[in-house]
Each structure stands twice: as C-alpha cells, then as structure tokens.
Amino acid sequence: HEMDLRLRQALNEQQFLLYWQPKISLQDFRVSGFEALIRWQYQSSILTPDKFLHIAEDNGLIQEIGRWVLQQAMREQHALSSAIGHPVQISVNLSPRQFADTTLIADCRRSLQQSGLSPSLLELEITENSLIHDINEATKMLGALKQLGVRVAIDDFGIGHCSLSYLRQLPVNTLKIDRSFVRDLPLDQSNNAIVAAVLAMAANLRLDVVAEGIETSAQQNSLVLGGCQYGQGFLYGRPMPLAQIESWYGEFK
Ligand code: G
Ligand code: G
Ligand code: MN
Ligand code: NA
C-alpha cells in the first residue's frame, strides 16, 4: 500500500516533527508546560495528524512513530525550558495501541534516562477509550507509570465512555476538558453545567483540570471563576515548532 510505504519512509528520513502548544496556569498566567503535537513535513506541506495517524494506527507503524514522539519530546524539553526561563512540563499524546503495549514502560524509562528529564515533568495523555478497552490491563499500566513517576492525563475528557466509578479508582493526575464543552462558554447553560460538574468532581478526586480550546477571554474568565487550574487554546498560542517558542513567549509575557 502506497501510504504505508510513505509513512515508513517518513520515519526513516525523519520527516516527522513536533509542534508545541503552550499550557497556561489560570492562577498566575505563567506557562506551565507544552503539549507535543506531531506533524509530517511532506514535500512542501506540513500535514496534521488527522491526515496520517489513523493509517499508522491501522498498519501498526504507530508504535514506532509513538516511540519517536516520546523520545523527541523529551529531547526538546530542555530547549523549551530555556526559552521560557523555568522548567516546563511536557505532554505527549499516546494512541490506544501504544497504551495497550507493555513495552511502553521500558520505552519511557529508556527515554527518561537518555534525556535526564525528571519523570514528573512528563505527562502522558490517553483517551477514555484507551482505559475502557481492558480496565484490568489499563489499571496495571497506570500503576507502572505512576511508579516511574510519570503523570497521566485523560484527554478529550467528557466525550468518551469512561465511567466515574472507573475514574475514581484509577491513578490518573489530570483531566483535559474536551474543547466541545469550552466552545459555547459562558452563555450555553448546559455546557456551563457540564464544566462546573467536571470541576467539582475533579476537586473532590484531587485531579488537575486543563480546559482545552480556549479562544476568547470570556471563555477564560468563566473557567477562572469556576476554579479551573490550566488552559490551552488559540487565545494563548497555537501549536508551533520549537524554533518559534522564544518569539511567541516574547509577545505572550
Ligand atoms: O493539533 P492537532 O491537529 O495536532 O491534533 C489532532 C489530534 O491528533 C489530537 O487529537 C491529538 O491528540 C492527536 N495527536 C497529535 N500528536 C499526536 C501524537 O504524537 N501521538 C498521538 N497518538 N496522537 C497525536
Ligand atoms: O485531542 P487533542 O487535545 O490532543 O487535540 C489538540 C488539537 O486541538 C490540535 O489539533 C490543536 O491544534 C487543536 N486546538 C488547540 N487549541 C485550539 C483552540 O483554541 N481552538 C481550536 N478550534 N482547536 C484547538
Ligand atoms: Mn491532547
Ligand atoms: Na484533547
């Protein structure tokens, strides 16, 4: 298959790169970290994951691509921190297949050793659906990650099928509220109620909350009022390559 070969070639020829989107503390508006988002430099265009990641997921290349992302993200963390002037956390998205594969632990451990990164500065983002596929295996994996000292976030929270009783028993650190709930804040009654409920539950379970997709200060302000600790979105910064972080930060601060 044509696309399989191209993806393989992309890996071999280092055509993948990372973009970084800032994560902002909504308490002091400092930069707390960055989320790594993969891109494919294909001929003269930069392709987003929706164009190729599902193919890699189907043909199994996602495992190798995922290992590359983890390693590369940890390599770039130091330069991100230098650009911002203090140590920043990095977040890496994991595909369901990566999360289901126990070699993840060894991969993380090796990349942590090679990069010298403090494990607490690494957060792995998984979706609810990664958790419910096999809850026993997921619980083991989360336990092993916790033992490594790595943090775990549930991405796109609220649109999947993870029950609250699972959530209570699983060792995760962070919920990332899906941007579909943030979009119509603060005017939409039901989204307001959903976000308030997630924030209340998270406070009870001692989980951090990141709101995704913040585009306006009205959205931001309602999240701040609700006690949401972190935010991400175009209001602060779009995903960008490492080389642009310094000039972005010059404008932001
Ligand atoms: O900004 P963006 O178009 O990059 O991201 C689209 C989707 O692709 C997001 O849902 C994000 O979770 C996913 N994604 C981005 N980078 C990675 C990656 O490195 N690994 C995996 N598994 N998913 C990613
Ligand atoms: O599922 P995940 O959260 O990993 O996806 C991140 C995706 O969300 C990326 O495609 C990123 O470009 C996109 N994104 C980040 N901030 C915003 C925003 O403020 N508005 C919109 N529409 N998309 C955003
Ligand atoms: Mn994510
Ligand atoms: Na998300």
Image (cartoon, rainbow, N blue to C red):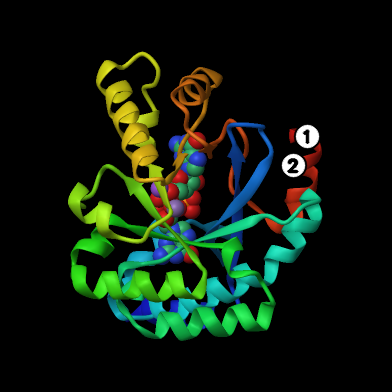
In this orientation, which residue lies closer to the viewer: 80 or 56?
Answer: 80
Using the rendered view, name the quadrant where residue 243 is placed: bottom right
Mark 2 Cα within 10 Å, few/some/many (few <14, many 20+)? some
Residue 191 location (% of width, % of height):
30, 25
Residue 251, labelled with which disc?
1
One can see residue 42 in this view: no
Q: Is residue 34 above or below residue 18?
A: above
Residue 48 location (% of width, % of height):
48, 56
In this orientation, which residue lies closer to the viewer: 217 or 195?
Answer: 195
Side of 158 relative to 117 (left or right)? left
Q: Amino acid at mark 2?
A: Trp
Residue 171, labelled with which disc?
none
One can see residue 70 in this view: yes
Q: Is residue 149 above or below residue 202?
A: below
Q: Residue at image x 19%, y 62%?
A: 132
Residue 70 location (% of width, % of height):
54, 72
Q: Residue at image x 57%, y 85%?
A: 110
For label 2, the residue is 248
Disc 1 to disc 2: CB gap under 8 Å:
yes
Q: Quadrant of the N terminus?
A: bottom left
Q: Secondary structure at mark 1?
A: helix
Q: Secondary structure at mark 2?
A: helix
In this orientation, which residue lies closer to the viewer: 58 or 196?
Answer: 196
Q: Residue at image x 34%, y 39%?
A: 204
Residue 229 location (% of width, % of height):
52, 36
Mark 1 Cα within 10 Å, few/some/many (few <14, many 20+)? few
Q: Amino acid at mark 1?
A: Glu
| Callout 1: CB less than 8 Å from ligand 2 | no
Side of 205 relative to 42 (left or right)? left
